[in-house]
Amino acid sequence: MVVVLFSCKKWTDPAAVNDPRLTNPYCNDPNAVNYNWGFPGRPDDSLCFYPVDLFRGTYIYQDSIFLIDGTYVFTRLDTLHLYALSQTKLAVLGFCPIGDTMHLTAGPTYIATVDTTLGDSTFVNRGQLLCRIQDTVSGTITKDRIDTTLLHISLQVVSDTGITVHSGTGIKQ
């Protein structure tokens, strides 16, 4: 009988121990790219950087355009401006000559994906409106992990005139 009553006693956590050896600061925000880098240590969220911080800035983008079958069409230079809308959402200006904005979602994996704003799983050309009402875009922008000044851009544009692939590199200015 005594054993049964003792086993019903509610658990209480022991007091925290302050270990003087744990002095290394680390980011403790799971939304950050550098979450838990440097753990164990002491949490310091002022060290955190977020997915959009990887991409933000102005880039000179060399855009090589191909038909879907791989036929080269032409190359052009664009100035792209990437700016943060939140910790994970970003906008791109400069891809279209009329100033339209392309919206992307950035993740801690150094990849930003074009948001799908048109269509659902039954829609053939899912994507986001681009430069004209007839154009939808889908694809990714990847931040180079070795050369932090580079973006690798791979987009597919579906329009009334066909499908084109935009592939190139952006260099941070």
Image (spheres, rainbow, N blue to C red):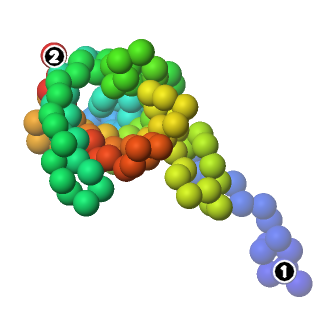
Residue designated by label 2: 173
Residue 2 higher or lower than 78, as above or below: below
Residue closer to the observer: 131 or 11: 131
The structure residue drawn at horizontal position 29% and vertical position 47%, both measured from the top left corner, is 165
Q: Residue furthest bottom?
A: 1
- Relative to 75, does residue 5 appear above or below in the rendering? below
Image quarter for residue 76? top left
Tell me residue 114's x, y (percent).
44, 41
Query: In x, y percent, where is residue 162?
Result: 39, 49
- Determine which quarter of the picture holds residue 68: bottom left
Of residues 6 and 54, the one nearer the viewer is 54
Q: What residue type is labelled 1?
A: Val
Give x and y (percent) for residue 168.
Answer: 18, 39
Location of the N terminus by quadrant is bottom right
In the rendered structure, find residue 4 and report the number of the disc placed on it.
1
Is disc 1 placed on a helix, strand or loop? Answer: helix
- Residue type at mark 2: give it: Gln
Q: Please name the residue shown 46% across and 20% down the image.
A: 100
What residue is shown at x 56% (from left), y 58% (from top)?
Answer: 124
In the image, 169 versus 159, the foreground residue is 159
- Mark sitting on residue 123: none
Query: Spatial distance from mark 2 to mark 1, Cα to Cα?
Result: 71 Å
In this picture, residue 167 sits left or right of residue 94: left
Is there any visible trace of residue 118 in the rendered image?
Answer: yes
The C terminus - image quarter: top left
Q: What is the quadrant of residue 26 in the picture?
A: top left
26 or 94, which lies in front? 94
User: Crowding near pointer 2: few (<14 within 10 Å), some, many (20+)?
Assistant: few
